[in-house]
Amino acid sequence: MTFKTPPRPCASPKPNLSGRLLHMDANREIPIDQDYEDASGEISAFDESSRTSLASSITQYRYENGRRYHSYRDGKQIYYPTQGLRWLRSRIGQYWAPNDDQSSIVDTIAHHIFLLTFDDKLFLAPLNNPKRALDVGCGNGIWALDFAEKYPETEVVATDLSPIQSPVAPPNLRFEIDDCCSAWVYPENSFDYIHIRMLFASVADWPALYRECYTHLAPGGYIEHAETTPITKSDDNSIAPGSMWENQGNLALAAGEKFGKTFVQIIHMKDQITAAGFVDVTEVRFKWPVGPWSNDQKLKDLGRWNMHMWEQGLEGWTLALLTRVMRWSYDQVKDWLRRMRATLLDRRLHVYQEM
Ligand SMILES: C[S@@+](CC[C@H](N)C(=O)[O-])C[C@H]1O[C@@H](n2cnc3c(N)ncnc32)[C@H](O)[C@@H]1O
């Protein structure tokens, strides 16, 4: 579904700024492939044949339960009550997913899923030779690398908490370590395009971030926010009350709330981008099946890759949130992950994510 707000007078000094918001088509039901559901045997998203100059402190990573986490801005703490009415401190950090190679693999799979979704396009905004572009929270930098290569005349800045980007990059791309939630130091009006992707539960104050984007975009510039959520849905009651999928969604909501950063920014982004002063805000919605359960070939392919992403990503998405924020033991998380992985492989379930 695409819709555009009608052009309207704008009190802001930069009436040409536009917003493009990407999340999903909630109206179209995903068609189901009965053959997939009826088949038996081992299931995996892919069978074997188809799987084919920084300050030193920012690399002094936190290692926990076998995973590696960012160190820059890692000091954020919360207090939680214990049985004896004592309050204990937990250092939860600014961000909850690991920054190791496994996480980078997951981000690379996600990049592929976005390309499948957008029919090989890197963005949907109607860009016209942007001079300067910013990628906020770039992860391993895969989107920025592709974008900079495609637009060699565009000066691209890509920022993240972790220095995990490729040391080899086109000359028009610069990676910077920065916390996007701190006041921005770029001059006003310095970008023509700002790209944000998959920063769910990464930002406590989204309206403030969108205002920074507005201030730092030149007149006529575009913001594009492509977001998803780990809260899954089904159109046929595949997510039964009390099921692991329901439990997973509730846990993500609770952990996000306790952490102070929502996992459902997709619900708020259009209104908040509009409130920041952007005009002609366009929202495009998509569905990502979890698993190849649709008989629509594009959605089947997408679902296969998405299931692969869940298989590879589940531990990293949950481990720190469940231990640091929800105060589970590592063993409890391991047991939950075992049950969740089994659920992921259940062919009867027609679960999808919004994007
Ligand atoms: C799920 S990854 C997405 C990476 C990238 N945008 C993409 O789509 O491939 C989220 C990234 O946001 C970064 N991040 C989280 N909070 C941040 C913050 N406050 N400032 C900058 N980057 C942040 C994380 O370090 C992580 O690399």
Image (cartoon, rainbow, N blue to C red):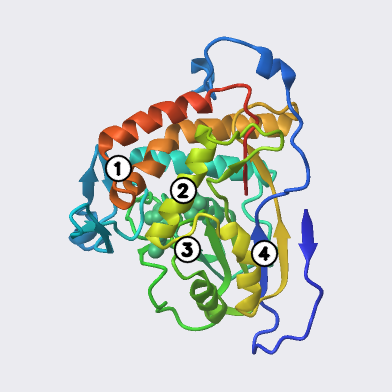
User: Which badge, 1 or 3, is on the more N-terminal residue?
Assistant: 3
Cα–Cα gap, marks 1 and 3: 31 Å
> Dot 1: what SS?
loop
Badge 2 crowding class, 10 Å Cα cut-off, few under 14, some 14 to 19, many 20 or more, is many
Residue found at the very far top of the displayed protein: 41
Q: Position of residue 259 (x, y in %)?
A: 38, 59
According to the image, label 1 marks what residue?
Answer: 328
**Rendered-image quarter of ligand 1:** bottom left
User: Which badge, 1 or 2, is on the more N-terminal residue?
Assistant: 2
User: Number of labelled discs?
Assistant: 4
According to the image, label 2 marks what residue?
Answer: 252
According to the image, label 4 marks what residue?
Answer: 20
Does the numbered disc 2 mark a residue whose Cβ is under 8 Å from ligand 1? no
Does the numbered disc 3 mark a residue whose Cβ is under 8 Å from ligand 1? yes
Image point (67%, 18%), residue name: 36
> Dot 3: what SS?
strand
According to the image, label 3 marks what residue?
Answer: 136
**Above or below, 121 relative to 88:** above
Query: What is the three-letter code of the residue carrying label 1?
Result: Trp
